[in-house]
Each structure stands twice: as C-alpha cells, then as structure tokens.
Amino acid sequence: MTKRATLPRAQRTRIDRPRADVLICGASFAGLAVARELTGSGADVLLVDRYEIGERQTSACAAPTPWLHAIGVQGSICQEIPCMSFHTPHGSVRYRLPWSWSSFDYPELCRLLFEQCDARFEIAKVQGRGPGGTVSSDRGDLDAELIVDALGWRRVLAADGYQPPDSPLSRGLEVHPPGGGSDLDVWIDRSLVRFGYSWSVPAEGEQRVGVGSYEPRHHVKDATVELAGRLDVPAVAYQGNWFPHRLRQAAEDGVFYAGDSAGHCFPLSGEGIRTAFYFGIACGRELRAVIGGEQEREQALRRYARFSAGHARAFGLALALQRLIPALPPRLLTLALRAFGRQPLIDRSFGWYLDQAHPSFVRATADQAATGAAEAGACGQALSHSLP
Ligand SMILES: Cc1cc2nc3c(=O)[nH]c(=O)nc-3n(C[C@H](O)[C@H](O)[C@H](O)COP(=O)(O)OP(=O)(O)OC[C@H]3O[C@@H](n4cnc5c(N)ncnc54)[C@H](O)[C@@H]3O)c2cc1C
C-alpha cells in the first residue's frame, strides 16, 4: 500500500515564506521540468504539491528513452522497450521503432529531477486563486509575480476547470502485478473498450496493465480486470486518473499552464509525460527570461501561449485519428496495421511523432532560437514557435 506522505492536519501550519519570485503549483512531470529549467537563475522558486515529491504515481510511466537521457533521469529506467506489438481480434503486428520506450520508476525519476533543481518545496493543497491574484492553499495564501499551474487536468487555478465526465478528458486505469514481457503491447479490442485501447508495459519484474477510454462516460474497471485475467496476472495495485485530449490556452489571467493543465497530453496515444517535460521546459525558459530582465511577464505569457498553440496541428491530427480509429471496421484496421508495418513507414511515422516534442529541445538554448541556429527538424520548428 502506498505510504501517504501528505502532512497531517496538525502540521499544516502556514508556509514560512509564502512569497517567492516564481510559484510552481504541482511537482510532477511538468512542474519539476519548469523548476529544473530555472536552476541557477537566482530566482526564489517555490514548488508546492499536495503530496511528497514522487509519492503518487498516476501513469504507466513509459516515455521515449532519448528523453529520459536528455533530461538526466536515465537512472530511473526499469526496462528499455524497443518494440511495440499491436493486437486486434483479427491478428497481431510487431513494430521495431526507430527509438525505444523505457518504463521507469516514478519516485526515482522525480527524485532525480528535483535533485537538479534549486527550488524550495512545500507540501500544500492548492485551492484556487485567492485575493489579489494570489494562490490560496490549505497552508495560507501564496504569492509570486510568476505563477505556474502544473496541477494536472483539473487546472485548479483557472476559473473554468474541467468537470468529468462532461469534458474532453479520457480516463485510464491500470494494475501493477508482478510480471514481465519484452514489448509494449497494445490491444485495440472493442470487447474490452469501445473507444480506446488497452496496454501492457513491462517494467523489469512488474507489468503495468491498463485500459484507456477516450469516452469519459465509459468505465474501465471491468475491462482492466478482464485484461489482467486474459494475461493471467492478478488485478492488484490499482491506479487511475483522467487525462486531457484537447489543447487548452497555455496562458490565461496571468498564469502559465504546463502539462495536463494545458491539455499537453497527445490525443490517441495518451502520452503526456514527454510533452509535460517539453512544455515545462518551454515555460521555464520564458520565466527565466523575465527573471533575467530580458522581457516582461506579459510578453512571456504571450510567447508561451503562442508556442503552445503552435502545436495545434499535430494535436489536432492525433485527435482526428483518435476519432477515426474506433470508427474503422476491425478487419480493416488490422489490414491497415499490417500495411503500415513496413520498416520505412514505421521509421517515418514514429520519427514524425517523436519530432513533435523532440528530446533535442532539452539542450536547445533560447539564444539558438533567437539566431535561428537551432538544428533543423522538429526542434528547430518548435523553437521557432517561441519567437516573438
Ligand atoms: C492510467 C494512466 C496511464 C498513463 N500512462 C502514461 C504513460 O505510460 N506515458 C505517458 O507519457 N503518459 C501516460 N499517461 C498520461 C500522463 O500520466 C499525464 O499526461 C502526465 O502525468 C501529466 O503530467 P503533469 O505533470 O502535467 O500532471 P500530473 O502528473 O497529473 O501531476 C500533477 C501534480 O499536481 C499535484 N496536484 C494536483 N492537484 C493538486 C492540488 N489541488 N494541490 C496541490 N497539488 C496538486 C499532484 O499531486 C501531482 O503531483 C497515463 C495516464 C493514466 C491515467
């Protein structure tokens, strides 16, 4: 059972220094990426989360291996996964990707990210915007000139947070039994989930087996238990959450949103860790330029919003596929998966997919963006979004 490191009520005293230069709400993938980008900036960065850092895993925790290396958390890798297998009731295909996935240990990844930050951390539950643009929490009002909401799909600091199931959210549930495997297995099987897919992610002695539904009204618990039964593993150690499938305004009412709070989770695949890193870094760069006196906060808000919106085409395409695939007759889908299985096609399409939030972005500097010296390809393309 997960040990809860949340502060007991008696210890929920007011935070000593509630004012900072930068306040980052949420200390998971996106929040830690923002904080990491601010390291050495000289700013007083306050990072808050309702749980201890790394305490609450909410995903299968697989990400492209090159990203985990680029961001310096390769020590958290459990297992590298070079191939994906797709299964329908009419057959299976196996793709060797031009890059690999890796499953990782969530607490360790968070620890390694936080180690790279010079932010101070406090456990506090954020409740929303307080008086005069502050942030209210169960440990008093917090304030900063630069405020980031990296709180996940609830977008707590916005006036219009989502309320499931009437929102563009998908729902996911998984179990973590002991087990193994070599591939990232994906089932597109309507007997399990009508609009969505199921997965099994090997993690060195553990198997992360789950079901995601693009239709938020459809429950996924029975399907998860059914899949675990089919794979002959026990349905134990549950975890689940909602995840967004539509981009939202990345800056609003003076607040920067990064990760799921801005809808930075790819539709179709439901992959949101890499993008939380990517947009978190982009956000951190804009904040850093404010701290360094190179731009005003309003300009940073505009530039970051534009950078995020510049990815609308890729997110829109993924959403169109998310709608199309469940509408295809299963036999046709199986044929399409087979036809798609030629190596040059796999290399091109998965290469394109990685390019949408490429790991070279970690090392690209604002200067490179400004001079256009960034390498060609998606990274250069992405950086150009951030130019004024
Ligand atoms: C079952 C499942 C499996 C998934 N598997 C994968 C996968 O394998 N790979 C992948 O790329 N994506 C996966 N995803 C999607 C991925 O988990 C999210 O896109 C990703 O976690 C987004 O990161 P984030 O930092 O924006 O938000 P989160 O990871 O949701 O972090 C939000 C943080 O804010 C904190 N918080 C929330 N509310 C408050 C509050 N009121 N006060 C204080 N703190 C608060 C939380 O404690 C948390 O630390 C999966 C999702 C689900 C549901």
Image (cartoon, rainbow, N blue to C red):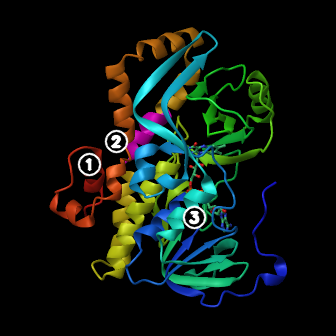
Residue 38 in the image: x percent, y percent?
41, 73
Picture disc at residue 355: 2
Outermost residue on the bottom side: it is: 16
Estimate the x, y position of residue 184 in percent, counting from the top left.
Answer: 56, 31
Residue range in magenta is 311-319
Quarter the N terminus occupies: bottom right
State the residue position of label 1.
381
Classify mark 2: helix, strand or loop.
helix
Kind of residue at badge 2: Asp
Taking the image as shown, residue 308 lies to the left or right of residue 127, namely left
Q: Going 42% across and 52% down the picture, which residue do you hit?
A: 69
Whether pointer 1 and pointer 2 mark residues with C-beta atoms closer than 8 Å, the reply is yes
* Image quadrant assignment for residue 143: bottom right
Q: Residue at x 59, y 46 (%)?
A: 61
Inspect this view and state whether residue 153 appears: no
The residue indicated by pointer 3 is 111
Q: Nearer the viewer, residue 189 or 311?
A: 189
